Amino acid sequence: MAQGRKREKTWRLIPRVQEIGFFNGVMATRQRLITVALSATAAELLVIYLVSTWMRATSGAPMSNVLIIALSLTGLLVAAYLDALVIGDLFFPGRWRERILAGGQLEPQDWEEEQAFVKEYNAPFFVIFFILLFGLYGLSQLLTNRFLAYYQDLGFALTLMRSDDPDDRLMGLEEMVNPLREQSWQNESLHAHIADLVDDDDPRVQAMAAYVAGRLDVVSAADGILEAFRHSDDDTVRADAAMALGRLEWEKSVAYTANALRSPDLSEAVALGILRGFSFSQDERAGSSVMVLLESCATKSPPQACSKEVVEAAFYALRKMKHEAGRSVAMSYLRSERELEERCAAADALRYIATGDDIPELQRAFSEVTPDDECAYAQWRYHEEKAIDVTEKEPLRAKLLRAIGNRKIFETYEWIWAVGADEKENDTTRKVAEQYAREMLAAYETRKH
């Protein structure tokens, strides 16, 4: 056989400590090992505390933070390993530390030591190592008030918001509107950061900050949002600011947003933002301005903001306000020369704001509509939130019938019953009529008894 053949290494589930070879220089004496281990542990805990304090308050470099956190956790591994070596030296028999330094080749001095040399204590060592590692991790989290959990839930987003890069600031705001972060939405530090970003130099960040402030109910940002609405040259910023003000129900803003809605130079985006803000706040004081806009949109020379979407949003706002004074303008939009989408939006609003005095006019409008005039869904989505149905899908006749039926006037029972009995009528409209007829009859029978 050839001489000098190398001994093949076998795979081991639990590695041998002497083969790892870490920190052999530190293990030269027990005193040195204990001193270094205690110093490393104390230094590591101090570093983690200082790092967490800095990252909570001032850090604006997200990638650097990730690297520093990774290095800090690596430091815990080192400290736990050194502490495990100390425990092994103190409690494992048979000059365990010296055997590790000698690579397991140390000669026993007596029979008891020879028996002790049979065991290498690799498994107990690693059990102790992992116990110490988790213990140090728990202690570090106790000292830093659960910093890693905080950083995952909120700290990373705040770091992004403090970044010099507007893309990072935008990402931080987008991160916080995730419903998974809802438990942190009332954090005062978060609210302060959002309020600051409402005045950001980047219009994208400013618009998103206004949206997030409205979504998270950051009332402290309301004055800044109002200033952004009044003075920004960016339509997206003004639109998001108007919606946020409505969502915050900031009463001081109604005069400004309602007055802006009357401007002939208003853009479609800003008009939609203002109207959607009114639908959030449901402040009836703005109703007259919404009516003025709708009246101007019905003229032969409407303002540039008068799109179908704006008209739909305006009627939706009147509907949410339950602004009965808007009945007349809504009735005017039921005329056959108006676009079907506008007539549908007006009919949807009348379901909530019509009165008994409007019934003859509603019945006339019903007779002028064909059974096949179908209203389509009209929706809008506020960023990534659930879509809002501005107009519901059903025949226009069904909407007009609902506007009459919702008044709950028994004198309309026979008319409604006749609609339900008409075989030429649309099936959906007939079902709506049958529903109202049953409800009216039941209410009448109840009053009789």
Image (cartoon, rainbow, N blue to C red):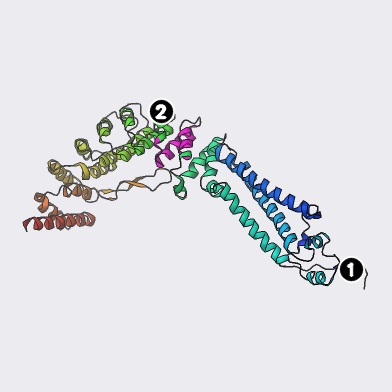
Q: CA distance from mark 2 to mark 1?
A: 83 Å
Give x and y (percent) for residue 431.
Answer: 21, 57
Q: Is residue 207 magenta?
A: yes
Q: Is residue 344 left or right of residue 15?
A: left
Using the image, determine if residue 100 lies above or below residue 36.
Answer: below
The three-letter code of the residue at mark 2 reads Glu
Residue at x 50% of width, y 32% of height: 202
Q: Is residue 74 left or right of residue 436?
A: right
Question: Could you classify mark 2 by the number of other residues whose Cα lies within 10 Å: few (under 14), some (14-19), or many (20 or more)?
Answer: some
The local secondary structure at tag 1 comes to: loop
Give x and y (percent) for residue 155.
Answer: 53, 43
Identify the mark at residue 219; answer none if there is no mark.
none
Q: Quadrant of residue 442?
A: bottom left
Sequence-first disc among 2 and 1: 1
Give x and y (percent) for residue 276.
Answer: 34, 38
Q: Which residue occupies the foreground of this view, 23 or 243?
A: 23
Query: Dots 2 and 1: beta carbons under 8 Å?
Result: no
Q: Which residue in the structure is indicated by mark 2?
A: 227
Residue at x 71% of width, y 59% of height: 87
Residue 226 seen in the figure: yes
Give x and y (percent) for residue 418.
Answer: 12, 55
